[in-house]
Amino acid sequence: MFDPFYPFDWLATQIVTNILGLSLKSHLGSSLHFFLYDVPKILTLVLVISFIVGTLQTFIQPEKVRYLLRGKRTIFGNILAAMLGIITPFCSCSAVPLFIGFLEAGIPLGVTFSYLISAPMVNEVAIILLLGLFGFKVMIMYISFGVILAIIAGYIIGLLKLEKWVEPFVWQLQKNHQKLSENNEFEEISLTWKDRFQQGWYQSSEIIKSVWLYVVIGIAIGAGIHGYVPTNLVVKWAGANNPFAVPIVVMIGVPLYANIAGVMPITEALVNKGMPIGTVLAFTMAVTALSLPEMVILKKVLSPKLLTVFITIVTLGIFGIGYLFNALII
């Protein structure tokens, strides 16, 4: 079977065995091989796929997202928001501007939350790394469960009618300038394919610049786990026989901060050590969907009560997804 990453594996093996004189079965040799193989593999995946996705994203401008979601008050709005979250760029620093911009455009609170859950958790980087590290089946299941979580959590928040717990200044702000015509229709911006490719390259280069350090750190941690952490220790505390493994890793993951690119190499090492993939991906969802910086930023526009409701609903949803994932992946 053709392996596009074989040159990286071969080079890592040559460096570890021939240049450094280490055995791949030793703790240090195994860790170094993991690190030297995964760094170029993951960065190549991120660069290539983010260029493709970035080019395609030029067809979906942020103003168009707001236009499409405006006034959608049924479950359809939550579904659309969660799906759009997959294909639109997002980072923690954009949480508040997006939140305010969505509400000002008339997008309901629950629909807005569906987008804010989906975008950081199920994005192009997640898809790239899941496919490269765990294969097509796991990638599809992760995306499906992540989108379902975003839809259900946003829908529940919408049903609870918690608009009163949004900070008052949000409702008093004037609408941001949007690319809407006087008849309230979205004005498309005409781009050539050259423009789209340039935007794709710009986005892929920006993503690489923003995530490469997290990738390297994540792979370094993963390499340490891969080479030095005993398999029986991982299995004992977070293996399939521990019914509390999912809640434990989720509660550990909620206060942590790492983007998806930094978490995935760690999850790869944990899976290799025997941790069930549902447990590992529940940890991944907790870290990315409920990252500490994003919660601190959202505190500026949400009351503590609404933030607590949001965290509780998403956390319980991740518990369920972790157990379901473990039941379905044998």
Image (tube, helix red, strand yellow):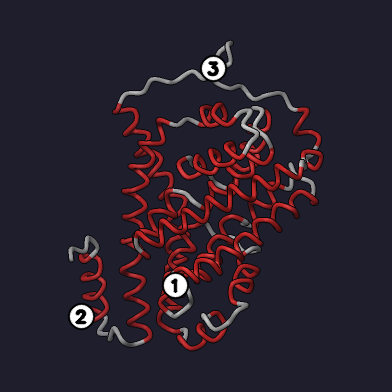
Cα distance between the residues tagged 2 and 1: 23 Å
Image spot of residue 271 (x, y percent)? 44, 74
> Which of the two marks, 1 or 3, is nearer to us in this view?
3
- Which residue is at 56% across, 69% downward? 323
Q: Badge 3: few (under 14), some or many (20 or more) residues near its Cα, within 10 Å?
A: few
Quadrant of the snapshot with the N terminus: bottom left
- 29 and 284: which one is in front? 284
Question: Which numbered circle lies on residue 18?
Answer: 2
The amino acid marked with disc number 3 is Glu
Under circle 2, the secondary element is helix
Residue 246 relative to residue 130: left or right = right
Kind of residue indicated by mark 1: Gly
The answer to which quarter of the image holds residue 16 is: bottom left
Mark 2–mark 3 Cα distance, whole angstroms, equals: 64 Å
* Distance from the alpha carbon under mark 1 to that under mark 3: 49 Å
Q: Nearer the viewer, mark 2 or mark 1?
A: 1
Q: Nearer the viewer, residue 200 or 254?
A: 254
Q: Are marks 1 and 3 in contact (CB under 8 Å)?
A: no
